[in-house]
Amino acid sequence: MIDHLEIRTRDMAASVRFYADLLAPLGYRLEVDGPAKGFGDGTTLDMFLVEGEPSSNVHYAFGAPDRPTVDRIYEVGRIAGHALDRAPALAPHIHPNYYAGYLRDPDDRLIEFVCHAAPD
């Protein structure tokens, strides 16, 4: 199991804004504001941003509890002016309930928000 992610970024301020905007609907907020910026949900620290040269050939997928949350995250990104990649949609070639939306972070990495649950 993954304990946490550490993501390198060229632009800390832009990355903090991107992740703060899009992780908020999942209950995450900036909890560590030192040289490394840590995001958590009040009980765990799951992701850190650090200054450095990013790897662009990696994509991250964040789990969402339901499809409306995936839609809301994508809409938050659109309203905030973040780079959109693919609108939320089913991907039945992965499995029948795979529902995901994709954005690009400030370092052009593909960031996915996915729900595996059947609709209510």
Image (cartoon, grey):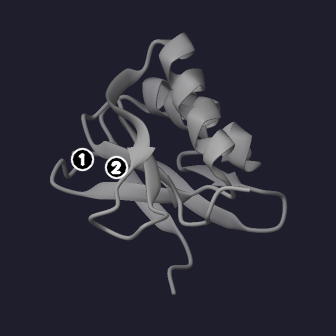
- The quarter of the image holding the C terminus is bottom right
Q: Secondary structure at mark 1?
A: loop
Q: Quadrant of residue 64?
A: bottom right
Circles 2, 1 touching at the beta carbon (< 8 Å):
yes
Amino acid type assigned to the residue bearing label 1 in the image: Pro
On residue 54, the disc is 1
In percent of width and height, residue 24 lies at 70, 39
Identify which residue is drawn at 34% across, 49% down: 8
Please count the marks in the image.
Answer: 2
Q: Does residue 82 appear anywhere in the picture?
A: yes
Identify which residue is drawn at 55% across, 12% down: 79
Identify which residue is drawn at 60% across, 23% down: 76
Amino acid type assigned to the residue bearing label 2 in the image: Arg
Of residues 69 and 6, the one drawn nearer to the viewer in this rendering: 69
Of residues 24 and 11, the one drawn nearer to the viewer in this rendering: 24
Q: Quadrant of residue 110?
A: top left
In percent of width and height, residue 40 lies at 71, 56
Q: Residues within 10 Å of mark 2 (few under 14, many from 20)?
A: some
Q: Could you tell me how far apart the alpha carbons at marks 2 and 1 are, in whole angstroms?
A: 5 Å
Query: Which one is earlier in the sequence, the residue at label 2 or at label 1?
Result: 2
Q: Is residue 52 above or below residue 13?
A: below
Identify which residue is drawn at 47% across, 53% down: 99
Residue found farthest to the bottom: 1
Residue linked to disc 2 = 8
Of residues 88 and 52, the one drawn nearer to the viewer in this rendering: 88
Q: Does residue 51 appear anywhere in the picture?
A: no
